[in-house]
Image (cartoon, rainbow, N blue to C red):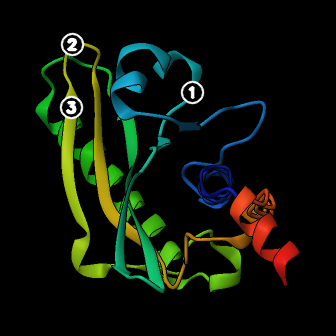
Amino acid sequence: MTNFLIDFKLYMGHLARLHREIQDTPEERHYFFGDLPDFWANLRSEVNFPAMVAEYSEVNYEGGKSNVSKRRVTSFSIVDSYDQAGDVNEMVLKVSNCEKIAEEVLGRMIKDPDSEKPFRTIDIESITGEYNANEANKYVGYRINLTLTDPNICIYSDNAWLPEPEPEPEEATETEETTDADS
């Protein structure tokens, strides 16, 4: 069984390396995996811009007794910095570019074959986008929220359980012993 979080982190990092404007490398980090508030608060100095921030997911289960699927509600953001505080034109240009890059990443996630993704489907109707800004530190971004589905994942596994212990043989009672001797 694969680990979704590890696979999702690696997949999004792969997309961050391949995108022409992000181009994440070990020498020049443009990719972060974690929560966006942590990125804004503490870790933004560890990456270059524009940057991709892929986030942890919330997991919901749905289906019936024999057919349970996991729906992972997750997000990723493209963030960028700007130079001049209060320069609305620069902010709009940067956040518009973040939106464009985020939609390109989303398009790639939709287009990639299932064998290359840690999920099977994207619930297209679940996708939302939102602008965000940290004006105090001169950062803007665009966040995509989406639901990823792994169909037909049954969460019960016989391999997770030890076999039931054999029942202890019951000791014969005096009545049973007398009855057996009388026969």
Give the quarter of the figure containing the N terminus: bottom right
Ranked by sequence position, the earlier of labels 2 and 1 is 1
On the image, the x and y values in percent for residue 13 come to 64, 50
Q: Residue at x 55, y 78 (%)?
A: 153
Q: What whole-number distance in Å separates the C-alpha atoms at marks 3 and 1?
A: 17 Å
Q: Quadrant of residue 124?
A: bottom left
Marks 2 and 3 sit apart, C-alpha to C-alpha, by 9 Å
Disc 3 crowd rating (10 Å Cα; few below 14, some 14-19, many 20+) is some
Neighbour class for label 1 at 10 Å: few (<14), some, many (≥20)? some
Q: Secondary structure at mark 3?
A: strand
Lateral position of residue 126 relative to residue 35, left or right: left
Residue 161 in view here = no
Residue at the spot of label 2: 136
**Residues at circles 3 and 1 in contact by the CB criterion of under 8 Å:** no
Mark 1 residue element: loop
Within-10-Å neighbours for mark 2: few <14, some 14–19, many 20+:
few
SS at circle 2: loop
**Residue 175 drawn above or below residue 89:** below
Q: Position of residue 80 (x, y in %)?
A: 38, 35
* Residue highlighted by disc 1: 47
Q: Amino acid at mark 3?
A: Ala
Q: Which mark is residue 116?
A: none
Specify the label residue 133 is tagged with: 3
Q: CA distance from mark 2 to mark 1?
A: 18 Å
